[in-house]
Amino acid sequence: MSRRALASLATAAALTVTSAVPVIAQEVSAPFPSARFPLGERGVPAKTHKSVTGGIDLYSVSTGTAGDGYTVTVLMPNGRDYGTREVAEAKAAEVEAAGQTATLQKIIRPAVSDDPAEEIYMVRVGLWPFKEKAKADKAAKELAEAGVKARADYLGDDGVKTTGPWEMQVLTVDPRGFRGAYAASLGASVAKRETTSSMAKAQNAIAAVNGGFFNIHTSPALRGEPVGISVVRGRMLSEAVPGRSALVLKGRTARITELKSTIVAVSQDGTRLDVNGVNRLPAADELVLYTEEYGVKTPADGGAEAVIDATGKVTALRQAGGAVPAGSRVLHGSGTAAEWLWEHAWESWTVNVDAKVIDQRTGRRVVLAPDVSIIGGGVGLVRNGRIKVTAKRDGHDSVNMILRRHPRTLVGVTRSGGLVMATVDGRKPGITVGANMIEAAQLMKWLGAVQAINLDGGGSTAMVVGGKVVNKPSDGSERAVGDALLILP
């Protein structure tokens, strides 16, 4: 065989071997930030890396040290752990009368982009090292026996200066290598809550995190209902709270913006009535739309209902309280809205329901195509590369939500269009402290997000990769939630 033939054969063999190696699995699709950790002592975090599939990488991050101890926090008359200076001073006097030494602690709840800083006061008793929690518990019990409500508190939860530690899971999606799609899921129904891993398994998702907040103030059977907008595969399943942050998913693209929604029912006689909500309990004189995804019967509240098929034809006009037939929607009216249905939604008439979602940054309509999903966020964190925490606009401007540290589920979009999903575990003294809102924004900026939002956190925080929960939920096991963000093959 000639030298040229041998060389050609060797080249072909080399090409064959190269093509058989899973190159993507060997490379890091999106580099992890080289900058120091933005919180605590700003050290270089310890991390492990796993390439999940093409364009998707998982990092486990650990950093910081446990330096916080325990104290006893005295509760104010309203049950909160803080109050005005006047209220706190009165409570401190009660502690002194009970024979304990009280310390008045001033704390500044930091300003956010849409809410100024707030000065609060706490009453604390004692300070013990981390390993002496039992002494704090004993002191709190003694105060309770003296008629002063109090509890032992881990100082790392306060939200003020700490050294950590922090445990995080970070999933990065590089659009140059990712060939799947993003989607939202509400599970088997809107009303029912499910675990993130259950929703991921049902759709064979590569990875998933829990989604937005759900309504814990409604009937227990309905608590899967999202608080804010939800669109799944182009179908609006919950209306928007105007101006709140949301994650808009289309195919393999993601963006964060503020949204509002409008829904109008138009009878064939030309009369119109605003639809006030989707898949939730109605208030007085409201018109609410129920879809077949609702999963339970509509409320039997004495109102009226029009059952509408896919063409807009009214197939039944009935008393309120019944199932939503497959392939249909139900307009449910209470009070004056019920009267409108009796007058303008007769059987065999047509009632069209026009639902619109408007991007408030651009003023443009979001087309609800089958490849579009929307998840309502809790709080905007980063906008156009700068920290911008919109806690008040997004309904979470309390001291507990802004200042206190909790487990967090965070989602961001990078300058190149990639997606970053992160979970910060918390409520585990000495192991991981979680993050407050400002810290969450700092973390997402550090991870390269130019737009970022906070999703539901606390015991809801969960990240699933390859069918397994990879973080450590603070409840000790995975919590059932309202919806989830899925990464599909």
Image (cartoon, rainbow, N blue to C red):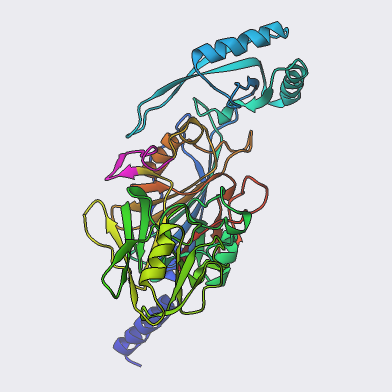
Q: Is residue 463 left or right of residue 242?
A: right
Q: Quadrant of the N terminus?
A: bottom left
Residue 90 horizontal/vertical position (percent): 59, 10
Tell me how many marks there are: 0
Residue 94 horizontal/vertical position (percent): 66, 10
Q: Is residue 449 left or right of residue 300?
A: left
- Magenta stretch bounds: 382-395
Residue 312 horizontal/vertical position (percent): 36, 78
The answer to whether residue 146 is seen in the rendering is yes
Residue positioned 62% across, 58% down in the render: 221
Residue 158 horizontal/vertical position (percent): 54, 27
Residue positioned 49% across, 25% down in the render: 161
- What secondary structure is the stretch in magenta mostly built from? loop
Between 272 and 190, the one lying in front of the other is 272
Between 232 and 156, the one lying in front of the other is 232
Magenta run includes residue 386: yes
Q: Is residue 257 left or right of residue 13?
A: left
* Above-or-below relation of 451 to 101: below
Between 403 and 77, the one lying in front of the other is 77
Outermost residue on the left side: it is 363
